[in-house]
Amino acid sequence: MPLYQLTSSSLVQISSTSFQDENLRERQDLQRLLKHNISVISPDTLVIAEEFGDFSDSNRRIDLLAIDKNANLVVIELKRTGDGGHMELQAIRYASMVANMTWDQAVFAYRRYLQAHETELDAESSLLEFLGWDQPQEDVFGQNVRMILASGDFSKEITTSVLWLNERDLDITCVRLGLYRSGDQLLLNAEQIIPLPEAEGYQVEVRQKRREERSSRTGTRDRSVLTLSINGEPFRSRFKKSDIGLNTVLAAMFRLSVESYQPS
C-alpha cells in the first residue's frame, strides 16, 4: 500500500524501495535495529537472545528469541526478501526446538544477551519485572511458543500455509515490512497482515478456550513427555503433550519434503 505526504495543496506519493536496493542486510541492519525496537513488530515483547542456537546436533540459529507478557516464548524470524523464502518452516523447526526451554535456561540465555550488549542489568530480576512476577513460576513459563515472521513481503505459499497452521492451533504472525524513500530519509512501515488486527483478539480467545477445554478434560496439568516416530524411526523426542500438534505438523511437512525428493 503506497504512502503519501500531505502538503497544503496535494498528496505526494512517497516512493517505495526495497532492502536490497538500499543495501540493507538482514542481520547487520534489519535485525540490529529491530532487536532494540522489537515493539515495532511485536508489542509487549522482550528479546532475550540473538542468533540463539543452543541445540544439540544442530547448527541452526533463531534470529531473535523473546518472551511476551504471558510468559510465552516468541520465535522471531526476519527476512529482507519480497517472498519470505521458507521462513514459516524455519520458524516451526525452531519453535519445536525451544518448546521445552525451562526458566533457568531462559535466564541463562538472557544473561548472555545482556553481557554481549554490555548491559549490567540482572537477567532474572529483569525477566521477573517484565512479567510482573515476584518469583519464578515454572508451571506458567513457556507453555506456548509463538512465531513472528517479518519480511519485505510474503509469497502466497507462505500466507496460505500460515493461515492453515493457525487454524490448527499454532500461533504465527506475519508482519510485512514496507520500505520507502523520501529524499535522504528511509521510512519503515510495519503492517501485520496475519492475523488481521481486527480478528486477532477473537482468534486468541478461541485458542485460549481450546486450551481450557483440554485442561478441564484432563483435570490436572499433564506433565508426560512424548516421542514421535515416522515409519518406526524416531523424529522428535522428549516434548510436552501440549506440543503434540506442533510436532505432528512438523513431522508431516518433513515426510512430504522427503517424499517429494524421491526418484520417480
Image (cartoon, rainbow, N blue to C red):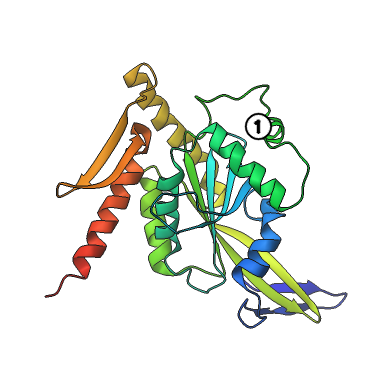
Please, which residue is most extreme toward the top here? 219
Q: Residue at x 54, y 67 (%)?
A: 79
Q: For label 1, count other residues whose C-alpha is less than 10 Å away and answer few (under 14), some (14-19) or many (20+).
A: many
Does 257 sit above or below residue 143?
A: below
Quadrant for the C terminus, please.
bottom left
Q: Quadrant of the N terminus?
A: bottom right
According to the picture, the residue beneath numbered tag 1 turns out to be 131
Which residue extends farthest left?
Answer: 264
Which quarter of the picture shows residue 185? bottom right
How far from the left and from the top, in percent, is residue 247? 32, 45
Q: Position of residue 88 (x, y in %)?
A: 43, 59
Tell me if residue 237 comes above or below residue 148 in the rendering: above
User: Residue sitting at 32 percent across and 26 percent down?
Assistant: 224
Q: Nearer the viewer, residue 35 or 56?
A: 56
Q: Tell me: 239 left or right of 101.
A: left
Residue at the image position 71 percent from the left and 48 percent from the top: 115
- Which residue is nearer to you in this view: 154 or 46? 46
Disc 1 marks a residue whose amino acid type is: Leu
Asked if residue 124 can be seen in this view, the reply is: yes
Res 44 seen here: no
SS of the residue at dot 1? helix
Q: Nearer the viewer, residue 90 or 156?
A: 90
Q: Position of residue 209 (x, y in %)?
A: 43, 30
Where in the figure is residue 31, as x and y percent of width and height?
A: 64, 62
